[in-house]
Image (spheres, rainbow, N blue to C red):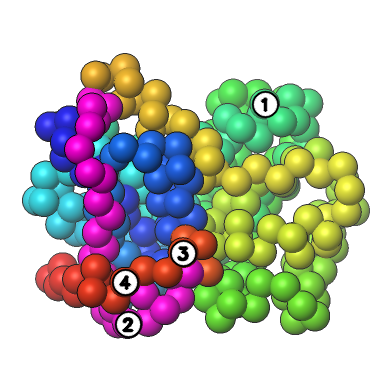
């Protein structure tokens, strides 16, 4: 099983920020990434629908014999992690919320901590619960920033439009003067610069992609499942529009994806 790929699941392209962090931290591993591009966004859907979609998508990865599942999508991690862990009890299933919350508490042990995410993640309160499980006294502020998702996918990650949207969403949070802000959505690391500028100085930005990669490394080491050698490979599965996926992926992965490496699949 050591040579099996790590499965990464996201609602679409944004989870490539997590793949990037994983590939940097674990350069010897192979990865199989599934973007449910036919059904994104997840962030505006009910918890029940997201759970159903996430279990179907994860099943497609497990069928291809991955050794560990990373739920790169914050919304799916926030509302579907228990369902995923129950459905795939034979392999470790790691979400992005707990590692992000841990990093936030380390960055701001006395708070306040701000969390920005999709509507679904904010509504479910998973980040606030994960932070309070580690530090009950910390004040947690939450703000849904749904427009950041299409802005990032359009490549509008800096400039006047992105800056105006960031100011619109973050004005109240800036006034509350948090010590740390969690980028609680796969797409938000692409907008890090405008988010940092809208929040002003003195706010540590936590990107859960990097902390999730560390959690995956710890898990593989402790179970003796780190790959020993051989050529690593990265493959992509999408449920719709493989050409668009390959085109937009550069924004999140920082490198182009060969359209030939993107396989369309049907989850139904
Ligand atoms: N991947 C989602 C997340 O991290 C953002 C995009 C969506 O709403 O599907 O929450």
Q: Circle 3 sits on which residue?
A: 255
Residue 260 in the magenta stretch? The answer is no
Q: Earlier in the sequence, mark 3 or mark 2?
A: 2
Mark 3 near mark 2, Cβ–Cβ under 8 Å? no
Mark 2 near mark 1, Cβ–Cβ under 8 Å? no
| Extent of the magenta region | 225-250
Mark 2 near mark 4, Cβ–Cβ under 8 Å? no
Callout 1 secondary element? helix
Mark 4 near mark 3, Cβ–Cβ under 8 Å? no
In front: label 3 or label 2: 3
Residue 180 placed where, x, y %? 75, 40
Residue toward you, 251 or 57: 251
Crowding near the residue tagged with mark 3, few <14, some 14–19, many ≥20 C-alpha atoms within 10 Å: few
Separation of residues labelled 3 and 2 (CA atoms): 15 Å
For the C terminus, give its image quadrant.
bottom left
Q: Circle 4 sits on which residue?
A: 258
User: What residue appears at the point 42 percent right and 69 percent down from the top-left corner?
Assistant: 256
Q: Earlier in the sequence, mark 2 or mark 4?
A: 2
In front: label 1 or label 4: 4
Separation of residues labelled 4 and 3 (CA atoms): 10 Å
Q: Circle 2 sits on which residue?
A: 243
In front: label 3 or label 1: 3
261 relative to 147 in the view: left or right: left
Residue toward you, 182 or 218: 218
Q: Circle 1 sits on which residue?
A: 106
């Amino acid at each position: 099983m050591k040579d099996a790929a790590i499965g990464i699941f996201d609602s679409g392209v944004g989870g490539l920020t997590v793949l990037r962090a994983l590939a940097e931290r674990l350069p010897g591993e192979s990865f199989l990434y599934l973007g449910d591009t036919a059904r994104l966004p997840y962030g505006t859907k009910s918890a029940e629908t997201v759970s159903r979609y996430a279990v179907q998508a994860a099943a497609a990865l497990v069928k291809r014999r991955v050794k560990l599942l990373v739920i790169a999508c914050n919304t799916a991690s926030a509302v579907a992690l228990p369902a995923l862990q129950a459905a795939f009890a034979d392999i470790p299933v790691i979400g992005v919320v707990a590692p992000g919350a841990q990093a936030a508490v380390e960055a701001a042990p006395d708070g306040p901590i701000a969390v920005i995410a999709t509507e679904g993640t904010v509504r479910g309160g998973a980040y606030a619960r994960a932070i309070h499980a580690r530090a009950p006294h910390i004040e947690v502020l939450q703000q849904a920033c749904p427009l950041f998702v299409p802005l990032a996918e359009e490549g509008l990650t800096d400039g006047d439009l992105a800056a105006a949207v960031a100011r619109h969403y973050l004005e109240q949070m800036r006034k509350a003067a948090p010590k740390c802000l969690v980028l609680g959505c796969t797409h938000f690391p692409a907008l890090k610069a405008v988010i940092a500028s809208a929040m002003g100085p003195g706010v540590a930005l936590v990107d859960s992609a990097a902390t999730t990669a560390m959690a995956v490394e710890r898990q593989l080491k402790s179970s003796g499942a780190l790959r020993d050698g051989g050529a690593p490979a990265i493959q992509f599965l999408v449920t719709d529009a493989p050409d668009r996926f390959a085109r937009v992926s550069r924004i999140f992965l920082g490198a182009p994806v060969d359209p030939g490496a993107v396989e369309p699949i049907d989850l139904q």
